[in-house]
Each structure stands twice: as structure tokens, then as C-alpha cells.
Amino acid sequence: MSETTGTRRSRPGFLRAVTRRFGTWPLFGVILVWVVLALVVFTVLGWLWGEGPLWSWQRWLTNWRGASAGAGSLDLVKVSLTTIGGIGGTGYLVIKYRERASAERAERDAEQNKAEQRLLSGVQQLGSGSPQVRIAGVYSLADVADTYRGEYRQRVVSILCGYLRTQRGERRTIVNEQDGPEQSSEEKVYVSHDGAVESTVLEVLVRHLRKRCEKTKHREAVTQLVEDDQLWCDCTIDLHDAVLTEIANFQGATFTNANFQGATFTNVNFRDATFTNDANFWDATFTNANFWDATFSRSAPPMGLPPEQVDEDGLPHGARWADADDEGLEAGSPDDAPAEDTGPGSTGSAAS
């Protein structure tokens, strides 16, 4: 299946390469090549239709000699005009082909320039001092990825993840005097000034990370909200050192490569999430985390979670292996599922 698909995809790529190569040649050179090819075909046809020894010159020159040896003037004119007309028609077709190829190339360039301009406009909006403009920029970038797809998906994901990694707040020291002034304590907390934009970015990410999945005994069905080629599940999600103060609801999301190293999550929900490849949690900090029924690949187990947050299989409490038997109890899963965001599926404090 994959080999057939690869073969089908390679043919259009080869044709595009040939088109671009001929599109860079001078017009006279292209016409000359096609004229030579037309004369070669004319000669080969004469060899196929001719008589005599297979590799004799007489047979190769059948078409050329047929117009002169024993032929009348009318036959000579017919052959000459036919040959000239064929060469002229070939030249005309080449010119039209070049015109069409140039028009298609110009259209592709214009479309790519339009995509780049929209991408740049979205980035500029994301850098605005107004939260309303930044929110508009998030949706604008998502629309670029949904419209142009392909490589634009990873570019937009990288921009949005990069935005979440930026400094969008400050750490403040809060004095706790609940037990009286003599027993007061100080606590450093991160105060964000960008909650509305942060929640918008997280909502857009989750929307494109939820891949359609049927309901099973141990997980709920996942509804896909975008088309297959608009999904970001195969993109790299790089949130290292990001500080997220808003609720990160990644329930039902599918991650191929996820880097949460050094990230700080105030409230994150990975319930029913699927990690198909690398999942880096080194030095990540969780205030409240739920990994209930999250699945991890045995070939790429989660990395960096502290011992108190994992079971004997190295999985977060409540999580399971992706290849476990759905009809029985999963490795590392307790008998009874707790309510969402509570019970053993939730992780309290965390990692350093």
C-alpha cells in the first residue's frame, strides 16, 4: 500500500521537475530540441515501415528516399509540406506549452507569496501590545495552516509554541500570614498578564490535535473537528520551559513528538491522550495533572517523570500502554476509573 502510494506520488514530482527544467531553457533551444526529436521519430517510422536488411542504411532512410527516388513532384511536395507542417506544429505546441508552464509557475508563486504575506501578518499581530489583536493573530495563523496545509502546519505550530515559551508574566513573592505574623511564609508565584491569549493558543492547539477515535472500554470516543490533512498530530509540539497558568485541556489529543522539558503546568488534562512517540517531561512541574487512560508507546516510554508520579511500569498514574489488551485491566491502571481531574489519575505537585 505504502509502496504504491509512494510510486504514485513520485510521478507528479518527476513531471514537475521536468517542467521546471524545460521552463528554464531558452525558447529557441526548446524548439530546436523538439524539431530534432520530430525528425528522429520521422526516421524511425520509416525504418519500421521499410523493407530490406534490419540495420541497412536503405531501410533507415526509407522515408527520406521515398520522397526522391522514383517519386513524382506532387509526392515530393506532399512529403515536404507534411514534414514542414509537422515541425511547425511541434514548434507551436512547444510555445503554447511554455506559455502554460509560465502561467502555472506564476500562479504558484503568487499563491505562495500570498501565504507568506498572511503568515507574516499573523506573526505581526501576535506581537501586538493589544490582547485582542494577538488573539486575532492566533486565529489568522491557524487559518493559514488550515488553508495551505503541508509544511505550513509545522511552521504555524512552531510559532504558536514559541509564543507560549516567551516571558508573558512575572514571578511575585506572596507573604502568607494565615497562622499569624510570627509564622508567616513567603511563596513565589508566577503571575501571567496574557491569560486570554494563552487560552486561545491552547484551544487552537487542542482543536488540531484531536484525531478521530472510536470509543473503547477504557476510553471515550474522540471527535475530530478538522479535516485529516489539517491535523497537527504529526507536528512537533515543543513547549520546553513554557509557563502555562491557564487550563491546558489536552483530553483526547494525539502527540507524535512532545517536548515538555522544564515546562510548568498549573492545570493540565492529558486524559485519553495518545503519545505515539517521544514524550519528554524532564524537569516539568505539575500543580494539577490528569493522565487517566493516556496511552504511551512501549518503544518510547515517557521520560523524566519523578518516581512518585509513576507506577511500577514507569507510566503516570492512571496511564497505560498503547498495545495493552482493551478487554482486560491495563498495566498501571487501577480497577475503578475516578472522576475526571480527580482521584489517582490526578498528579499533585511536582517534578524537579
Image (cartoon, rainbow, N blue to C red):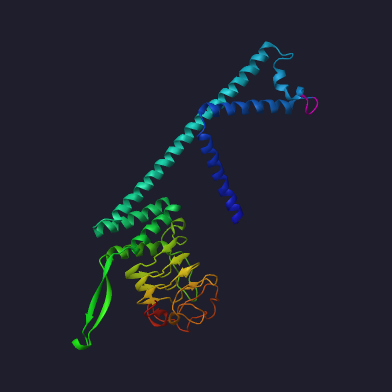
| Left or right: residue 40 compared with residue 221 | right
Q: Report the quarter where the C terminus lies.
A: bottom left
- Name the residue furthest right: 53
Direction front: furthest residue: 182
Asked if the stretch drawn in magenta spans residue 296, the answer is no
Q: Nearer the viewer, residue 101 or 185?
A: 185
Query: Hey, which quadrant is residue 349 in on the image?
Result: bottom left
Seen from the viewer's position, the closer of residues 283 and 68 is 283
In percent of width and height, residue 77 lies at: 64, 14
Q: Is residue 54 magenta?
A: yes
Q: Is residue 344 above or below residue 141?
A: below
Q: Quadrant of residue 11?
A: top right
Q: Is residue 97 above or below residue 217?
A: above
Which stretch appears magenta?
52-56
The secondary structure that dominates the magenta segment is: loop
Whether residue 298 sits left or right of residue 145 in the image: it is right
Q: Nearer the viewer, residue 50 or 185?
A: 185
Which residue is pictured at 41% across the width and 63% down the height? 238
Q: Using the image, determine if residue 219 lies above or below residue 9.
A: below
Q: Residue at x 64, y 16 (%)?
A: 78
